[in-house]
Every structure is written in C-alpha cells, then in structure tokens.
Image: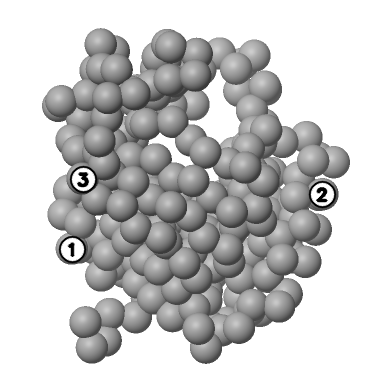
Amino acid sequence: MISPPHPSFAALGQIDWDDTTSILRGCTPLFDALASDPTLLATLVAGVAEDSHLADMCEGYDFMHKLVLYDAADLGVRLRLHVYQAGFFDRPHNHRWSFASHILRGGYIHRIFGRDDQFSEDTDPTNLQAIHERLEQPGSTYALHHTSVHTVQAEADTISLLVRGPSAKQRFLILDATADSFFWVYGAAQESPEQRASKRLTPDQLANTITRIQRLIADLDPTSRSASLDGR
C-alpha cells in the first residue's frame, strides 16, 4: 500500500470486503478523520490536480463528477469523492465491488431492491419494489455489498465520500426504465481508449470541479458530520 496521508487510512488494509460489518468498521475512522478535519479533506482534494495517476481516474458525467482522492492499487482500494448535479436520479444497478459511503453535504433518497441474483437483463425496472428506503443526510454512513441492487436520488450539490474495495466481478448491470433498455458497465481494464476518454475529466473540467468542491466544503460544520459507531 502506498504511504497513507493520515493514520486513519491504515484500517483499510484490514477490511474483509465480503463482510459489511468489517467494511463499516474499517472505513469509519477514515470518514471521521475527513469529516472532522477540513484541512485534511481540502488537501486531498487539491492534491488530485497535482497527481497524474489520480487525475487520470477522475470522471465526469452529466449528473455527477467523481474524484479519486487516494488509490491503494495493491489492495484494490480507492477513496473517491462524488459531487452531484441538480436532479440526479440514477437507475437500478448493482456494483462490481463492495463499498462504504459517507454523506458530507446535501443528501439523497436511498432505495435498496434486493440481491442481484434476482436481477437480470429481463427484469422490468418499473416492477422493482424497494425493500429498504431511507434519507441519507450529512453524517450518514453505510456499507453496501456488491450484490445489492439500489438507486440514489440526490439533491443538487450533494457531496459524498466513497471507499470501494477490490473488484468482485468484471461488470455490473444498469436497468434504464426511461429507455426501456439495459446495459452492462465494465471496469477500466476492459474499456477501450475511446470509452475511457469519454469519461475522463479534462484538465479544465478537473480544475473547475475542484474549485466547486472547495467552495462547497468550505462551510461544512465538522461537529455534525461524524461517522462514529460509538454508542450504536
């Protein structure tokens, strides 16, 4: 693992990524550190532009931008920051990897529909019924197994942190009810150069995204953003 920028990163190397309890406990110290220390978070955000390896993994879509703040390639673990655009509403999907997420700003409605062994190209997304629905707000933290099928519906300018584990499969499925279709999404190793280029943030886009994030996180109140499990 590369030299971590803070002691709280050390626990990431001890996580069992098939166990959501282990994921939550291993990621919580890092989320607490980032939520309570604005300087640490600001330093990681600003450092992305100066690290070509991290900058190359940052992606932009019409509904959200993703920055990679830290990459432990030997562990298959990354820390990402997501910033959402107005009106974001994603489509039912699973993931290639298990992860933990923490809300820093804004919030989203989080719906979970079940496991992906009952989720396929033939599934009608209009018939999916959530078995768990909650509002994730600043300070909310959760772990999700890669077999879970879910959606999030985010407020504008919502910011979340996400720690993803090693890939458990090569692709994940997205169902698009609006287009009455489905599509598979593969990891970067299986994408063509053209596909990678279409997602990658240009230097100007990256600089603008970093400036936007710096503005949005400047007024965060650290006392209300803790992810601590104490007392739970």
- Of the numbered discs 2 and 3, the one sitting upstream in the chain is 3
Who is closer to the viewer here, 6 or 99? 99
Who is closer to the viewer here, 189 or 98? 98
The Cα–Cα distance between marks 1 and 3, rounded to whole angstroms, is 20 Å
Describe residue 43's horizontal placement relative to residue 162 as left or right. right
CB atoms at circles 1 and 3 under 8 Å apart? no
The Cα–Cα distance between marks 2 and 3, rounded to whole angstroms, is 38 Å
Task: Name the quadrant of the C terminus.
Answer: bottom left
Please determine whether, in this image, residue 216 is positioned above or below residue 91: below
Q: Quadrant of residue 171?
A: top left
Q: Could you tell me residue 145's position as x and y percent? A: 24, 46
Q: Residue at x 37, y 31 (%)?
A: 92
Q: Quadrant of residue 162?
A: bottom left
Who is closer to the viewer here, 84 or 100? 84
- The circle drawn on residue 103 is none
Q: Nearer the viewer, mark 1 or mark 3?
A: 3
- Of the numbered discs 1 and 3, the one sitting upstream in the chain is 1
Secondary structure beneath dot 3 equals loop
Residue type, numbered disc 3: Ile
- Of the numbered discs 2 and 1, the one sitting upstream in the chain is 1
- The circle drawn on residue 131 is 3
Q: Could you tell me residue 14's position as x and y percent? A: 24, 63
Q: Could you tell me residue 31's position as x and y percent? A: 44, 71
Q: Quadrant of residue 95?
A: top left
Name the residue beneath numbered marker 1.
Answer: 21
Please determine whether, in this image, residue 213 is positioned above or below residue 71: below
**Residue 218 in view:** yes
Q: Nearer the viewer, mark 2 or mark 3?
A: 3
Name the residue beneath numbered marker 2.
Answer: 208
Task: Name the quadrant of the N terminus.
Answer: bottom left
Secondary structure beneath dot 2 equals helix
